[in-house]
Image: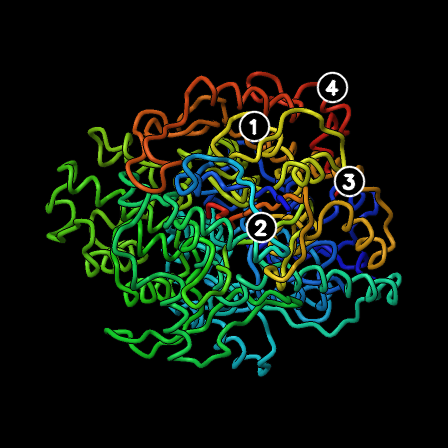
């Protein structure tokens, strides 16, 4: 059954490999995926450890539902202490890796130590081997995956790999599987690189026994009907996440020219409909594809239509590549966006972070804070497509002074660049913000300020807050599974009720990440999509474990609090601009300049923001400094952590 | 018969700032047509060229999404239509 999948401890320094069952007591408290990884991180990472040192444990996992009869259980979660932020490192990717790992017998890996020379880990039907990867070092993410398949003689092998960015310890290098599935954020690829670990390859044919298979399949049919009948799924399935970018840009919620504007002008060539045309012209009408067990199919396939990389195949681009190579640097050509997307996928680097780093450097260059001396002669002004792509190469290969400096992430880079460069760095906890502008949306501003892994949209974002849903529907969503009768507002510019929404989504997304399912199959973007009422049934039919919706909510709270405890242990304090729940001053001081009338001229009100953070902490059961109270620790059974049960 | 249409904040500059507009019609499509006749600026945000409802617009009738075949859904006096916009904000 799904619950008999094991955990493996792999020490790359000694070569020791140990496998264990996952105790039911642990399952019931942390489920799997991100939640159980948070337990493992809190228990195995020594306080203050060097994120790029051998003591930093790297967890790779699937969720408790991975590869069962539930839909969309494709997600692989990766966790360690982040070399980018020094706090929680956590990233999540789609594709087919985690299901294959489950069929190979494992739900969780804990990788410690450092190999003397490049290696990869080969996992096959319960067996684990550490193999030489010298011949893989220097290869791109795609080349690496195919080389492993060729070496082992099996084209069905799935691998989680790093590219050259991970090898060069770019502190926001990602881990990738397939063409574009990226565990992108917080630099998990650099952690792999620091361990001389090029890849983890898996292949499995071990059956997963379903507890109640007929019920599981019947319930999943309802799930699929719900997902495929939602309008947002149809839009995602035809245009992918660029539809969000296009809508957000036309409205005025898109970070442009670093943070100077909230809307990109003259964007016709990179609008979602134009990208869809390119995909149709280069691949054909059926160019959308998906991950394991998916009914949404949000991922486009394309070939670069022109330029030096013409004809290269890739997938996407997602919202984040449109931001990184479109609106942030104010580059308006589809060729540039599609090429940039291809480069980051091949190098294995977080598109969001690298786009933000380059846009920040462009603003510094135009302000004269850095000059052509620091850029080695590169004219790093906004709108220079060639300079943008050149900087991608330089950062990923750590070439030149600026490429090397930016590869370390924004805060260390600001210390090396000096002057007032930090003031222009749009980040929280050392991680760059999504390419969106939250000055008109206080709920989203609170989300990015308080997200556990740094500024982020996938940890607690109340995205449906922007839809203008009927208040009764909002009340129904946000009053379950625990009662809530406080304020709620359908107006995205309001401050009232937003702390509860962020708290609610924080728990919702943690549940989703513990189950191992994709957020596009949840209430994240669609008010009618599955929710806390559905998931306990899915867990029961597939695994036999029984939870009420409230119990599932409490598990999510417990896991979120463990992440909070880790961050506090590693130095988070509430108002610290570099390690706290605080926004860059530009959110408070610089009004938006473009967009629809409801977003022009807005800033986040500093006092109201402070009040929102207070309220959010209160909902979380934290004190005014954001520390879980003893009552919260008691209620969630966290007093004995680290308990070292696993 | 009168049906109330709730307007997304970002579209209210087309309705002179009105949060809700009373319209008439037998179906959701009729009601939106009536809305556009009175506030023509709403036309381009609700419909694609060619007359298809915009993929980012989802229409709720009372508490329920009208998707698919949104425009054909019948309405009655006292119903409330919500024009929701799948902005998401990234």
Report x, y in % for residue B31.
Answer: 56, 52
Question: For numbered disc 1, what is the local secondary structure?
Answer: helix
Give the camera-side residue of A442 and A212. A442
Q: Callout 2 environment at 10 Å: few (<14), some (14 to 19), or many (20+)? A: many
- Disc 2 to disc 4, C-alpha distance: 33 Å
Q: Look at mark 4 in the image and give the residue it sits on.
A: A631
Q: Pick the residue in front: A338 or A472.
A: A472
User: Which residue was labeled with disc 3?
Assistant: A29
State the residue position of label 1: A569
Mark before the other along the chain sequence, 2 or 3: 3
Judge by depth and name the residue closer to the eye, A2 or A136.
A2
Residue A360 at what x, y percent from top left?
27, 42
Which tag, 2 or 1, sits closer to the chain's start?
2
Q: Which chain letter goes with mark 3?
A: A
Q: Is residue A346 left or right of residue B63?
A: left
Residue B39, position in %: x, y? Answer: 43, 46
First in sequence: mark 3 or mark 1?
3
Counting other residues with Cα less than 10 Å from the Cα at mark 4, is it few (<14), some (14-19), or many (20 or more)? Answer: few
- Chain bearing tag 1 is A
**Distance CA(mark 3)–CA(mark 1):** 21 Å
Whether tag 2 and tag 3 are in contact, CB under 8 A, the answer is no
Mark 1 vs 4, N-terminal side: 1
The residue mark sitting in front, 2 or 1, is: 2
Q: How many marks?
A: 4
The image shows residue B27, relative to residue A574, as above or below, that is below
Q: Residue at x 76, y 54 (%)?
A: A20
Label 2 and label 3: CA atoms lie apart by: 27 Å
């Amino acid at each position: 059954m799904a619950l008999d999948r094991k955990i493996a401890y792999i020490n790359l320094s000694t070569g020791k490999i140990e496998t264990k069952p996952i105790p039911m007591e642990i399952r019931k408290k942390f489920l799997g995926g991100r939640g159980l990884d948070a337990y493992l991180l809190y228990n195995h990472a020594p306080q203050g450890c060097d994120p790029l040192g051998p003591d930093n444990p790297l967890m790779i996992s699937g969720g408790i539902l991975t590869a069962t009869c539930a839909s969309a259980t494709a997600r692989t979660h990766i966790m360690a202490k982040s070399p980018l932020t020094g706090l929680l490192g956590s990233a999540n990717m789609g594709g087919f890796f985690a299901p294959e790992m489950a069929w190979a017998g494992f739900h969780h890996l804990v990788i410690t130590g450092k190999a003397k020379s490049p290696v990869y880990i080969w996992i096959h039907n319960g067996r684990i081997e550490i193999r030489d990867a010298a011949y893989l070092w220097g290869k791109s993410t795609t080349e690496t995956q195919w080389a492993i398949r060729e070496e082992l003689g099996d084209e069905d092998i799935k691998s989680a790999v790093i590219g050259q960015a991970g090898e060069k310890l770019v502190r926001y290098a990602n881990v990738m599987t397939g063409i574009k599935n990226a565990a992108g954020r917080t630099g998990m690829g650099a952690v792999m690189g620091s361990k001389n670990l090029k890849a983890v390859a898996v292949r499995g044919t071990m059956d997963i026994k379903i507890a109640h298979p007929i019920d599981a399949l019947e319930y999943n049919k309802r799930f699929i009907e719900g997902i495929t009948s939602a309008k947002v799924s149809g839009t995602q399935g035809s245009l992918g996440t660029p539809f969000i970018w296009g809508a957000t840009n036309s409205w005025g919620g898109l970070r442009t020219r670093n943070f100077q504007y909230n809307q990109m002008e003259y964007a016709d060539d990179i609008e979602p409909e134009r990208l869809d045309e390119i995909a149709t012209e280069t691949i054909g009408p059926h160019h959308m594809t998906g991950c394991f067990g998916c009914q949404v199919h949000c991922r486009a396939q394309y070939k670069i239509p022109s330029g030096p990389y013409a004809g290269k195949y890739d997938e996407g681009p997602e919202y984040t590549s449109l931001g990184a190579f479109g609106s942030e640097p104010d580059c308006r050509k589809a060729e540039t966006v599609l090429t940039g997307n291809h480069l980051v996928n091949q190098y294995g680097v977080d598109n969001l972070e690298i786009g933000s780093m380059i846009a920040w450097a462009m603003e510094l260059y135009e302000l004269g804070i850095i000059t052509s001396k620091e850029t080695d002669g590169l004219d790093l002004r906004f709108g220079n497509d060639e300079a943008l792509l050149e900087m991608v190469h330089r950062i990923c290969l750590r070439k030149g002074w600026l490429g090397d400096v930016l590869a370390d992430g924004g805060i260390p880079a600001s210390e090396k660049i000096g002057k007032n460069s930090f003031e222009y760095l749009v980040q929280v906890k050392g991680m760059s913000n999504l390419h969106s502008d939250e000055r008109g949306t206080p709920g989203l501003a609170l989300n990015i300020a308080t997200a556990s892994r740094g500024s982020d949209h996938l940890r607690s974002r109340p995205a449906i807050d922007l839809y203008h849903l009927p208040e009764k529907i909002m009340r129904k969503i946000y009053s379950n599974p625990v009662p809530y009768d406080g304020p709620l507002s359908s107006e995205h510019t309001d401050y009232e009720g937003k702390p509860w929404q962020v708290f609610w989504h924080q728990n919702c997304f943690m549940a989703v990440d513990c189950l191992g399912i994709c957020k596009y199959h949840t209430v994240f973007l669609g008010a009618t999509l599955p929710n806390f009422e559905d998931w306990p049934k899915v867990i029961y039919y597939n695994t036999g474990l029984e939870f009420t919706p409230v119990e599932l909510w409490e598990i999510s709270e417990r896991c979120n609090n463990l992440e909070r405890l880790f961050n506090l242990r590693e130095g988070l304090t509430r108002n610290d601009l570099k390690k706290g729940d605080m926004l860059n001053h530009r959110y408070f001081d610089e009004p938006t300049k473009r967009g629809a009338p409801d977003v022009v001229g807005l800033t986040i009100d500093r006092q109201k923001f402070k009040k929102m953070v207070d309220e959010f902490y209160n909902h979380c059961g934290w004190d005014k400094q954001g520390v879980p109270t003893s009552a919260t620790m008691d209620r969630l059974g966290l007093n004995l952590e680290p308990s070292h049960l696993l | 018969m009168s049906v109330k249409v709730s307007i997304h904040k970002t579209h209210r500059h087309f309705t002179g700032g009105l949060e809700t507009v009373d319209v008439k019609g037998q179906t959701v499509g009729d009601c939106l047509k009536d809305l556009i006749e009175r506030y023509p600026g709403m036309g381009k945000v609700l419909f694609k060229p060619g007359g298809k409802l915009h993929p980012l617009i989802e229409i709720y009738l009372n508490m329920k999404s009208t998707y698919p075949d949104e425009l054909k859904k019948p309405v009655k006096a006292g119903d409330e239509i919500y024009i929701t916009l799948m902005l998401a904000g990234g």
